């Protein structure tokens, strides 16, 4: 395990640099210390750090001791790890051609960033990153896997009982405890083997959902049923409803704290576009809605792109998200992300003057608040900014 000083060392290496470890020196307290050759005068910018982290995750850490393909010693500074090179040579997958074409209309700069170097990887929850809504089966699988240590709540306990009932019973004469029920995650037992099989866990959870909901329906009288919210059935019903409401949502994280993350759903476009009532709602938080509604509608017209950001604060006014930090009033979500909020008046003026496209701006009504990854409903990723900024207006048409 690396000493804590190594983590600090990584933070000070620019994304384009090769890490070279010098001989260790000893501190006064006797602990060895690592130092980097020719340290820069200042550390990398937040944007450089994000790129370095992405390169580190996708391609690994390149050391000067690695041989070049011809076997002649250290690789040059501009060489890339073989895994990264293989990834870059692979054909690019186009998920939503309509939205990608729309991105080119939105911004040539963003389109180039997206087609030439967009990326995403799992990360801690962070502002400027995203939270992805996982399927209900994934959420239940995490509850099942946590149940062995007493976690997972009432759903975890119910799933655990179903799981243990399905585990094969060792035949008489089998030797060793590894094949017995209750084998720990590290002993290669049947329990660990089955829990590690995600496809199996998904099928078990699907069966649990179907049978539990069917049992609840059987108890209904006159189309109504009383369900104890603290029971496994009640907990599943709530989780089922939430999963349906949040189905496949992708949330841009605006801020994160110990209480959870707040953000806006990027892929819930509103059908209403360019009407006065919507414009007044979007501008309510500016304090100058009456003066700005007319210019907004005149400048954006039918190209006003509005989204339902989430179930909370829908009457509090809109939120403007974009990638132009030069606008007066724009605030960067987090240093280095180049994702900005605010600057409504300046955005309207820029579009009216022809300096920016209406598609360069995304307007949101409502928020998500207090989102966490602890129960498996959401998974956090960091991403390149065009992934978060590109419009999703044609998403439903492509399904």
Image (spheres, rainbow, N blue to C red):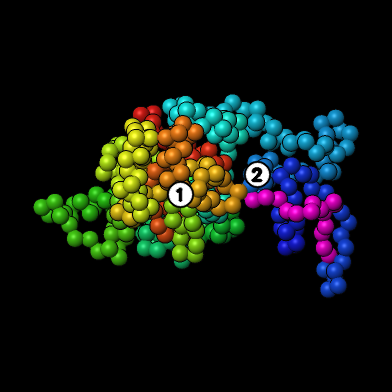
Q: Is residue 36 above or below residue 297?
A: below
Q: Quadrant of the C terminus?
A: top left
Near-viewer residue (388 or 236): 388
Q: Is residue 238 left or right of residue 150?
A: left
Q: SS of the residue at dot 1?
A: loop
Callout 2: 10 Å neighbours few (<14), some, many (20+)?
some
Label located before the other in sequence (2 or 1): 2
Question: For residue 40: magenta?
Answer: yes
User: Can residue 100 be seen in this snapshot?
Assistant: no
Q: Which element type, helix, strand or loop, lies under badge 2?
A: helix
Q: Mark 1 highlights which residue?
A: 342
Q: Nearer the viewer, mark 2 or mark 1?
A: 1
Q: Which residue is mark 2?
A: 51
Identify which residue, 226 or 81, lies in the foreground.
Answer: 81
Q: CA distance from mark 2 to mark 1?
A: 25 Å
Where residue 15 appears, x then y in whole percent? 71, 44
User: In this rendering, is residue 265 above or below 257?
Assistant: above
């Amino acid at each position: 395990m690396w000493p804590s000083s190594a983590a600090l060392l990584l933070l000070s290496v620019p994304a384009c640099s090769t890490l070279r470890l010098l001989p260790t020196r000893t501190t006064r307290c006797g602990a060895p210390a690592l130092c980097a050759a020719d340290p820069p005068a200042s550390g990398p910018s937040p944007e450089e750090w994000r790129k370095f982290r992405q390169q580190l995750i996708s391609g690994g850490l390149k050391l000067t001791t690695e041989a070049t393909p011809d076997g002649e010693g250290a690789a040059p500074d501009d060489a890339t790890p073989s895994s990264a090179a293989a990834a870059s040579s692979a054909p690019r997958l186009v998920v939503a051609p309509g939205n990608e074409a729309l991105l080119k209309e939105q911004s040539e700069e963003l389109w180039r960033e997206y087609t030439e170097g967009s990326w995403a990887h799992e990360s801690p929850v962070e502002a400027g990153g995203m939270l992805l809504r996982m399927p209900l089966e994934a959420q239940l699988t995490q509850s099942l896997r946590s149940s062995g240590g007493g976690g997972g709540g009432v759903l975890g306990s119910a799933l655990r009982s179903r799981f243990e009932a399905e585990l094969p019973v060792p035949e008489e004469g089998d030797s060793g405890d590894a094949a017995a029920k209750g084998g720990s995650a590290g002993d290669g037992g049947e329990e660990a083997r089955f829990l590690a099989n995600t496809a199996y866990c998904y099928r078990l959870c699907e069966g649990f959902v179907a049978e539990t909901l069917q049992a609840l329906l059987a108890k209904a009288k006159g189309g109504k049923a009383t369900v104890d919210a603290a029971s496994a059935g009640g907990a599943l019903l709530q989780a089922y409803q939430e999963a349906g409401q949040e189905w496949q949502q992708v949330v841009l994280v605006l801020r994160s704290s110990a209480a959870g993350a707040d953000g806006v759903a990027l892929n819930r476009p509103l059908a209403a576009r360019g009407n006065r009532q919507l414009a007044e709602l979007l501008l309510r938080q500016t304090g100058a809605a009456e003066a700005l509604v007319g210019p907004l509608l005149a400048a954006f017209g039918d190209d006003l792109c509005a989204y339902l950001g989430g179930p909370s604060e829908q009457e509090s006014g809109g939120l403007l998200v974009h990638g132009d930090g030069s606008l007066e009033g724009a605030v960067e979500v987090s240093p280095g992300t180049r994702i900005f909020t605010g600057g409504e008046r300046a955005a309207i003026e820029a579009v009216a003057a022809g300096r920016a496209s209406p598609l360069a701006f995304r307007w949101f009504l409502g928020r998500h608040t207090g989102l966490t990854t602890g129960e498996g409903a959401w998974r956090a990723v960091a991403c390149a900014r065009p992934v978060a900024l590109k419009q999703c207006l044609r998403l439903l048409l492509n399904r």
